[in-house]
Amino acid sequence: MLFIHLKRKFTSYLIENFLTTKAQVLNFSKRFSTFCFLDNHGYEFKKSYECIVGAGSIKQFVVHEHQTDFDSLDKFIDRNKNNWIFGHISYDLKNDIEDLKSANSDGIQFPKVIFFVPEIVFIISSSHLELGIFDPVNPDDIFYDSIKNYKPGNDKKQKIPVLKNRFSKKKYVDIIRKLQGHILKGDCYELNFCQEFFATGALINPVKVYEKLTRTSPNPFSAFYKFGGKYLMCASPERFIKKTGNRIISQPIKGTAKRIYDNAQADTLQKESLLRSTKERSENIIIVDLVRNDLAKICKEASVHVEEFLGVYSFPQVHQMISTVGGILKEKIQFSEILKATFPMGSMTGAPKKKAMELIEKYEVTKRDLFSGSVGYINPNGDFDFNVVIRSLQWNSSTNYLSIMAGSAITFNSIPEQEYEECLVKIQAMKDALQ
């Protein structure tokens, strides 16, 4: 891929109109059947890029329901090691990593794994724009006309979908109590249980929904992702895994407290209460230990350590407790080996991981698809950055099926009714984006 410089006049325009430029690049990219738009929204959170976009597809590695061939995945990445690669890993890759199965309903039907080499890469910051393109024929004219002069106006109107819940509150509470019974028996220590809010016949404008979602809830691992007629609109605050050189980090989130907008003092107390909470701290500590164990499988001996423990960060809707675990990778570790050791992320399963996933399949009724999975990129140096897909909407434009999932960490000390309310807090930004 050749990176080129645009006309000075055009570049100056882009820098001066930074936020508008991101919107214009997003609207430009939607003409492609496959693209990935990743936005940091200005957070200084060990970020790699402020905004990076891969649009179009030169080559693809796609896995549907059949067994994932990890060797072929590594070969695809190796053959394209001098190119950018974008893509996703759905939650059900777990079935190929562990001896598990999924029989729940799937309204979205994203492929299990997609990686693609894009036709065009945009790297956007407040000071510059870089553009990578395979066929740089008159690129100034193409992008000057297509991006700067883009004027929306022909987009389809939305029909506000009526969301339904897969579980009544009573059913949800009953399930949580059953899960706590499993915890009491020693089957697991913690489990991330999710519920789906869905709509059929949902007619939405996915770009507009994403733009509204990220205005309301701008988070550091936001993603707009499209493959064919399937869309992900994601405002995630959580990183799954990041590699820089031979160093790898994971940043699990466990521990949530609702923001109090109209009272700064009360909001500060809410944040301090989260940090002191025995329940929330224990949730995070359990997953930190799991992540340390995962990274130890692929990192040099004694190199894994906790870089930040129980940090509390504030986002537009919630305060979150985040820890950072890092290590030095062993020599010649393949991408598939990293996935097998770390995926799915412990924050979205529980511990021990395999038993927690078995119970998730037993008590949840919907396939998670990209929810609890990951979207990200691998750069030409072999470094990568992948998010955790939460706080998101998924939409299948062929069937007009819309899915919003939310979950929370269940421990023996959880109060089921409060866990239900936490899910409602987490989906509020997505509901608002649909209005």
Image (tube, helix red, strand yellow):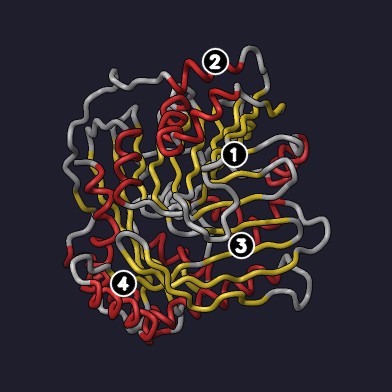
- CA distance for labels 3 and 2: 41 Å
Which residue does the numbered mark 3 point to in the structure image? 342
Q: Do the residues bearing badges 4 and 2 touch, measured as CB atoms within 8 Å?
A: no
Q: Which comes sooner in the sequence, label 1 or label 2?
A: 1
Q: Amino acid at mark 2?
A: Ile
Q: Which comes sooner in the sequence, label 1 or label 4?
A: 1
Residue lying at 46% horizontally and 68% vertically, measured from the top left: 253
Q: Do the residues bearing badges 1 and 3 touch, measured as CB atoms within 8 Å?
A: no
Label 3 element class = helix
Q: Amino acid at mark 1?
A: Phe
Residue lying at 75% horizontally and 63% vertically, measured from the top left: 329
Q: Which comes sooner in the sequence, label 3 or label 4?
A: 4
Q: Amino acid at mark 4?
A: Ala
Residue 30's spot in the image, x, y percent? 43, 26
Which residue does the numbered mark 2 point to in the structure image? 142
Which residue does the numbered mark 4 point to in the structure image? 257
Note whether 65 is above or below 217 in the view shown. above
Q: Amino acid at mark 3?
A: Thr
Label 4 element class = strand
Residue 97's spot in the image, x, y percent? 61, 56
